[in-house]
Image (tube, rainbow, N blue to C red):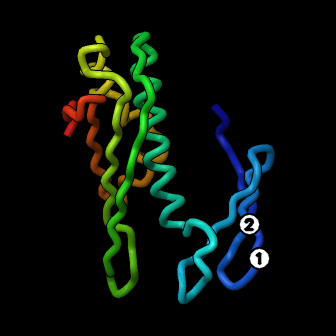
């Protein structure tokens, strides 16, 4: 694993930035109206996507380590904003991950669920300032982690 990384960005207009991920391409971010034009996700949404992506990838790693096939996985993250000391802050994120297979098809699911959050660099990094809750459901809608 690389111990350093860099991302560059450039202001395009008002609050719109072109974010350059180098070999991985570019993404446009923008603040919603009235500040920006809402032409891309704002930084709060990019952070939320990073948390959900990292948790999902960590769960895939934990399951695949035991040769379990999670199937087609999806995730949704809902962020909560509130004023803290008069300024808007992200105070919480609720991540819901849905597995593409049933719990019965995943022989080592319990063991993977016990450890996958610890592998998530992003979530564990932001948890010191933002409450992050995680639920996991199997393909039948059964909650396997609250």
Point out residue 101 in the picture as x, y percentages from the top left corner: 34, 23
Classify mark 2: helix, strand or loop: strand
Point out residue 132 in the picture as x, y percentages from the top left corner: 32, 52
Point out residue 36 in the picture as x, y percentages from the top left corner: 60, 83
* Precedes in sequence: disc 1 or disc 2: 1
Classify mark 1: helix, strand or loop: strand
Q: Quadrant of residue 118?
A: top left
Marks 1 and 2, Cα distance to the nearest angstrom? 7 Å
**Residue 90 numbered tag:** none
Q: Please tell me how many numbered marks the rendered image carries.
A: 2
**Quadrant containing the N terminus in the rendered view:** top right
Q: Is residue 122 above or below residue 69?
A: below
What residue appears at the point 54 percent right and 59 percent down from the top-left corner? 46
Q: Which residue is mark 2?
A: 18
What residue appears at the point 35 percent right and 40 percent down from the top-left corner? 97
What residue appears at the point 44 percent right and 38 percent down from the top-left corner? 120
**Residue 12 numbered tag:** 1
Crowd class of label 2 (few under 14; some 14 to 19; many from 20; radius 10 Å) = some
């Amino acid at each position: 694993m690389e111990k350093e990384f860099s991302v560059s960005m450039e202001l395009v207009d008002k609050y719109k930035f072109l974010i350059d991920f180098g070999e991985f391409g570019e993404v446009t971010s923008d603040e919603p109206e009235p500040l920006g034009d809402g032409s891309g996700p704002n930084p709060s949404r990019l952070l939320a996507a990073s948390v959900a992506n990292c948790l999902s990838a960590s769960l895939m790693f934990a399951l695949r380590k035991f040769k379990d096939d999670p199937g087609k996985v999806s995730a949704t993250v809902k962020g909560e904003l509130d004023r803290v000391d008069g300024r808007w802050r992200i105070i919480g994120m609720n991540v819901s991950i849905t597995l593409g297979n049933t719990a019965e098809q995943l022989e080592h699911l319990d063991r993977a669920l016990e450890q996958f959050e610890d592998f998530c660099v992003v979530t564990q990094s932001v948890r010191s300032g933002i409450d992050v809750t995680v639920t996991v459901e199997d393909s039948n809608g059964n909650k396997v982690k609250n």
